[in-house]
Image: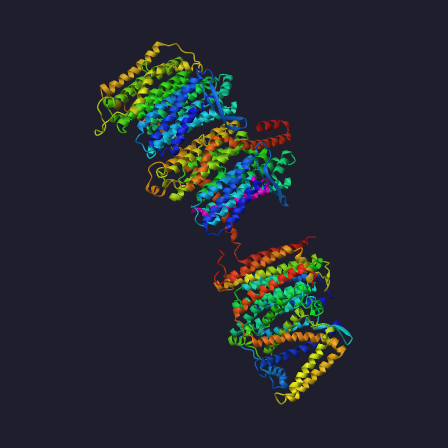
Amino acid sequence: MNAVPLSWYLILSAVLFSLGVAGFLVRRNIITVFMSIELMLNAVNLSFVTFSYQFKQADGHIFTFFVMVVAAAEAAVGLAIILALVRTRRTLEVDEVNLLKF
Amino acid sequence: MTLLNLCLALPVAGFLLILAIPKENHRAIRTAALAVSLLVFGLSLGLAVRFDTSLPAYQFVTNVPWIASPAIRYHVGIDGLSLWLVILSTLLTPVGVLVSWRYIDRRVKEFYALLILMESGLIGVFVALDLFLFYVFWEVSLIPMYFLIGVWGHERRIYAAVKFFLFTMAGSVLMLAAIIYLYTQAATFDYPAILSLVAEGRLRFSPLEETLLFLGFFLAFAIKVPLFPLHTWLPDAHVEAPTAGSVILASVMLKMGTYGLLRFSLPLFPSASREHAPWIAVLAIIGIIYGALVAMVQPNMKKLVAYSSVSHLGFVVLGIFSFTQLGLDGAVYQMLNHGISTGALFVLVGFLYERRHSLEIADYGGVATPAPNLAVVFMITTLASIGLPVLNNFVGEYLVLQGTAQVNFRWTVFAAIGIILSACYMLWLYQRAFFGAAPEPVRAHVHDLSPREWSAILPLVVLMVWMGTATQTFLPPIGAANARILEHTRQNVEFHVKQRPPGAASAEVARAR
Amino acid sequence: MDFITLSVVKAVILAAVLMTTLAYLQWVERKVIAHIQLRMGPSRVGPHGLLQPLADVIKLLTKEDLIPPHVNRFLYILAPFLAVTLALMSFAVVPFGPEIEIFGVRTPVQLTDLNIGLLFLLAISSVSVYGVALAGWASNSKYSLLGGLRSSAQMISYELPMAVALASALLLSNTLSLREIVDTQQGYYLGVIPKWNIFRLPFPQILSFVVFLICAFAETNRLPFDLPEAENELVAGFHTEYSSMKFAAFFMAEYANMITGCALATILFLGGWHPLWPAEWGAHLVPAAVFFLAGAIAFYHGAHPARPRDRRTLPIVAVVFWMLAVLFLLPEVRAALAPLFWFAAKTGLLLFCFIWVRGTLPRFRYDQLMRFTWKFLFPVAMANLMATGLVVALFPDVS
Amino acid sequence: MLHLWLIPAFPLAGFLLNGLFGRRAPKLFVNLVGVGSVALSFLWVLNTLAALGPLETPHIERYFTWIQSGELRIGFDLVADRLSAVMMLVVTGVGLLIHVYSIGYMAHESGYYRFFAYLNLFMFFMLLLVMAGNFLLLFVGWEGVGLCSYLLIGFWFLKKSAADAGKKAFIVNRIGDFGFSLAIYLIVAHFGTLDFDPVFAAVRERPLETDAGLLTLVALLLLVGATGKSAQVPLYVWLPDAMEGPTPVSALIHAATMVTAGVYMTARCAPIYLQAPIALEAVAWVGAFTAFFAATIGLAQHDIKKVFAYSTISQLGYMFLGAGVGAFSAGIYHLVTHAFFKALLFLGAGSVIHALGGEQDLRRMGGLRKQAPVTFWTLLCAAVAIAGVPPFSGFHSKDAILLAAHHHSPALYWIGVVTAALTAFYVFRALFLAFFGDYRGDPHHHPHESPPVMTVPLMALAALSLAGGYFGVPAWLEPMFPVSEPAHDVALVVVSVIAGLAGIATAWWFYVARPGLADRVAAQLGGLYQLVYNKYFVDEIYGAAVVRPVVEGSEKLAWRTLDVSVIDGMVNGLGARAQSLGDVLRRIQSGNVRSYAAWVLFGAVLVVVAFGFWGGWQ
Amino acid sequence: MDAILFFVFAVIAVACAANLVVQTHPIAGALSLIGVMGSLAVLYLLLGGEFIAAVQVIVYAGAIMVLFVFVIMLLNAGAERPVGRSVVARYLGVPVLVIFLGLLSYVIQSMLPASEAVRFGGFDGGAPAEVGRLLFTRYLLPFEVTSVLILVAILGAVVLGRKEL
């Protein structure tokens, strides 16, 4: 056995994604939550690249690239928001940031 | 670039121009808005000059693809029906600018920008010959008005603006649905193309389909008109809107509804139109009487005028659904008349508000003493509004009722009651506001018309007399256009008749004739 | 010899050479700085302090490995090794010379030739922030933390103009493989001006070279950008709390990074191992000449010793140099080693610049530092990139 | 082309000049323009009629198309035939006199220019009305005079009662116009045109409608219009209130010209009526009832102008009676003579009021015979004319009507006779109360005779009132209204004359010979007197039965209930329901992002599980 | 070799990801995530995505995660305080997750029953030149749009980062 089937990559991707979701649900630290999202994005990227391999087209890479760009933008803005949030609310707990909830 | 495209594009350019002016420079903004709107008005007069009544087709046509898929085209053109409505829009925009000159003192830039942008939307509605384009313009004109009311209105402006928006939206989404359905059937949004398909029988609807489509369009238009039970947004919107908003709303926007009925509902769905005409006419008549009755007891001037609009527009709808040349001509003429006279009323009420800062009739009284010119102009406008001969409304109302009488005399009887009532509420308003001794606040604050105000109102007054006496300036293009619309409704009905057993057909034809 | 064995052999050689170089680079630096400051520098341990690095290593190895309380132990230990590992990883892709045949094996003087070598280097350089940052954070000391923060911000900021400057050069070379980049710079204009990217038509990359160099200073936290370890503000910055071998690891990383940076500059802008002028003009004699000259100088100083023992040591050094010179006169050896010489010479020159600058320039203030990159370097690099791109697009055939 | 259009155009020009420039212009200018324009108009009428000669056929001038829609063309057509010729003469002639009179009467008013502008405008519309060549143009004039009436009644708009009266006049007229306009719609709907000649030609071709039919409906609707404009039962209520206007206005509009428009219109539409006997009968009975009814009210009024107002209503009733019994020419004849003597009565009353400084209450007058002799004598002329004393004008016209009425139905005749007696009584009652006995008014006020500018028109009108009976109007109108002339029954004439004289005598007995008797009689009559004195409470009944229900119904039912509560309530309720639904749904949308994520996850799990069970999408 | 690499880095990735979920301290999470990203980069290489692997390290590990670490350091974020979780979540969560993952794997596996084996070098379309060509031809507009997006993000971050919002 010196090669693994394509589907294993996809399964890995799914596992990583699920772990990301789990992290998103379980963690309360807003930064960790944010990182869980990044993990999900990464998992998706893996799927893209895998599909790209499957179809022998580079398009999946392009999409991964775009996802990265979006992630970068998201990180920049998101972390800026977190900074602003901590400045005003003095907490990183997502559950404590509930002013806009009913 | 036809003249018509110029009329459409110039306001947008003006909009951008105004956006480019620094917001502190109120004077420049106002001047720019006035200049642009006057320029557009001048151009639109060119439309009237170069319009050829004898030609049976749309004129100043531009027909280019806009969106490839779905096939949406930028197809615009005017006929006698749209011609005067376009000019009405372009006339009232400078008036709106003038009346807002001192009335609007905050967010001036945004106000004028929106006002000018709205002009484009309004013109667009009247000239669009592509259903989708029509819908786009329909919404484009809606949104600035929403802001005009919501931002520059009075105390309950948010409520009124939202109500206005929701009512109109509720109708227009149905229309959009109907338009899209039409597209799925006809594979085109192009109105003349669809019309010819319908006329040639290549596009056929089952009675249920046609009824639903008709109702989809009708509801959007009926809300905009507004027809009787759907009218309650109008008083609120008017009361809360700034003067220019009220003027445009009453004078032009309401016409979008009646225009739509005439342009789209009738020719596209002739059988359904005729089938539903009776209850629509009844609603229109209820609107006439009901609007007048309610107007009579309003303590607020703008509300009064708003309800009077409900009444007046009832005549228009009645005329449209009379399916007679006279009725249609009268309806269109009445649209213009209402635009002029009710627009003038709102302008004048705005003048009063600028002086006394109240819309309650009870706060006035004896205005004729300190402001005789204002009183005279108001009187003329009042008389026009109640349909005195020699002034404009009379002609429209007469033609509408005459057309109705040819179809159903009972309708005429009830509708004519509205004319009695119009005298009641308008004269009562006039008496309470202008006659009697002037109380102290009125004497202190109310002064006579300034040159700016004269320039805003005088054209309207002149038009009232002109349209009341020299109707042949306006009627021939309208008549020609209406004749074509009527022809369409007959063609279609006859086609449908052919598909049915002979017994039913003769009755149908008899009804159509 | 199969691929893996070859790689292992090459890696061992590289590691040995590199370690020595790193150790002696420090010695050179101390010496040069000392001379700039009119001192002697290390001179007690061995002749001219030549054994000083060895002594330092022994000292650092034998020092008590102190772990302060309240630190995050895992990260505290991880950080220096992360730093040094990453720094050394870079050398895996650096081509020191052309393909040579040695003991019957044809192989490039390079551990591996990735077709994305440059990207690899960039990736390593961008990840190398972590060492410093984590060290600063894990130490649980405010000086360290501030130093760590400063350094990560600084490194991220300077990475941008650096990458952009690299990209301009790439536009001319049109490949990401470092070896191929060097290959494209072969040849001479008019037979004399080398086709290095710094001189390359249609758009000589002098600006980006300067930008790259400045960024390299910042990336390695060297003066005048050594804010993270500004000793008069932060004691010693991110490595305040480190001692013994972990401390040494940071130093190794710093020097390794310096070398990487200089090597990269050489590869990208200075034509790698290609000689300064054509062989017809005697380029092949240059190494011998240089070593001969060095030997002569050493001999001269031996003859006129400043200290008594110089009389013994310097002639030995001179003899070594002369032997080297003779070695380079042998055609077979020269063919294999001349490119290495040129590469080392260029890199060494740049390294000297590093040291020179350290001895000359004062330190920036932190806000000046940031402003400099964002408001000056980055726009300049950007403009240069655009200009390059435009010119390359307009004159694709000129090169 | 005789330029008929100049006749209405002169007053219109006067209106525009005075209206636009009058405020700042000197009085002389206003006078010249105001009176001059009417004078020019009058002269042009004379000129035209002289040119037209006997007018065997109508002279029609078509100017421009006013409205053209489909087949229907409505032109600006003016017509001069025998009927309109009479009307033109009356309108411009009497109008001219009243204009002249107004110069004196209105001399001290602030809105002087406005008054003349309105009067000129009225002349324009009135002339348009009588010269119109089609129904719609007639309607234009019809509405226009209503407008002017409104403006002039409300001339003193600072007074609430004046403004109210103006409004009332307009609205009541509108109700009448409602009927008229419906008639127009019917005409067009069935005849396709509004020009008089084609319509009447078509009407004549239709069979006589013994049962109610189209023409009956048209005629009745026209009658509704006429009752509005000519103040007939049930729409007469505005006219007494209209006395709030300046007296010349009452004379010109509410006595001589405008209110007779209904009669004119009825006469104009005679072909229609003649085909619809039921409608004609209705006209007769409305006229007769109005004549009697208004006369009874006139008996008990104290305001001199109100007396004459009810008298006007009563006399208009006479004219309708005349028309209704088929004697259109008699009706028009009475219209003409009535214009003379009623204008005179009003102008005289105005003169009295002028003399007393604005006093209108008969109870505060008396003994003015000496202070204002010209007024007295001219008023006396008018009184004898209206009382039907031979050989003055009223006698001729009224007798013609009564004869025709008797010919038609004796009952109508007797009503007419009683009315004639009542008329004579109340007119002379007013005369006696004002001019005989002692002065009962403000002792500090000294009554004085009016200036010549007022008295000269009075004298002119007096002459006309006396001699008006010899103008031969019926003969002139003969070709238009061919009526079988009933035998000149002397007995009938004597009866009516005696009735008139009896009325005069009773008035003399009550108010000159035995002052105080009237009050005693009134007291004895009690309820009946109160009923008459309060005008049969008609205004109150209308108020309670029509106005209040409409206004309050509109306010409470239509607006507050239907509009605000039901429709808006439904709309707002819809909104509120949507909101409360949202309130419920919102609980799922807790705002907790991770709970959303959990839901998403849940959905995703479901999808995966579903795939697991059903094996994907192959 | 391919399989070994895959398993090594897949295990690292999963372990790091699990660590991210389990760790309460954000910096540990961040390092775990870096680990995941690094492993993924290697897997990308295996899948022929050279360019994307490098970018993965440069952008994700080198920029984004540095930003995270930076912020964590700046805020000196501490570990989460443990709160009473429901017993169900604590004891059922992991088994359910595992079962779900198993199911998921089964579904994927069953949907791609005969997927080809991944071999290093089996796909060479991920070279920078190829990716660049696509980016500047077929995906030019999205590419430009992302640049605008980045610009907007920069502005947003600058605005949000100001002292007083």
Residue C199 position within the rendered picture, expressed as x and y whole percent measured from the top left: 66, 67
Q: Relative to B29, is C292 above or below?
A: below
The quadrant of the image that shows the N terminus of chain C is bottom right
The span shown in magenta is B127-156
Q: Relative to B107, is B496 above or below?
A: above
The answer to if B144 sits in the magenta stretch is yes
Front in this rendered view, residue C73 or B344: B344
Residue D440 position within the rendered picture, expressed as x and y whole percent measured from the top left: 22, 26
Q: In which quarter of the image is residue C181?
A: bottom right
Q: Is the magenta stretch mostly helix, strand or loop?
A: helix
Q: Is residue D544 visible?
A: no
Q: In this view, does A9 lie to the left or right of D136?
A: right
Front in this rendered view, residue D214 or C133: C133
Q: Relative to D53, is C314 above or below?
A: below
Residue at the limit of the structure toward the bottom, as seen here = C308
Residue at 26 percent of width and 26 percent of height: D355
Residue at the limit of the structure toward the front, as seen here = C190
Residue B214 position within the rendered picture, expressed as x and y whole percent measured from the top left: 57, 37
The quadrant of the image that shows the C terminus of chain C is bottom right
Q: Relative to C44, is B237 above or below?
A: above
Q: Can residue D4 be seen in this view?
A: yes
Q: In which quarter of the image is residue D529?
A: top left
**How is colour applied across the structure in the image?**
rainbow
Residue C106 position within the rendered picture, expressed as x and y whole percent measured from the top left: 76, 73
The answer to if E72 sits in the magenta stretch is no
Front in this rendered view, residue D501 or B60: B60
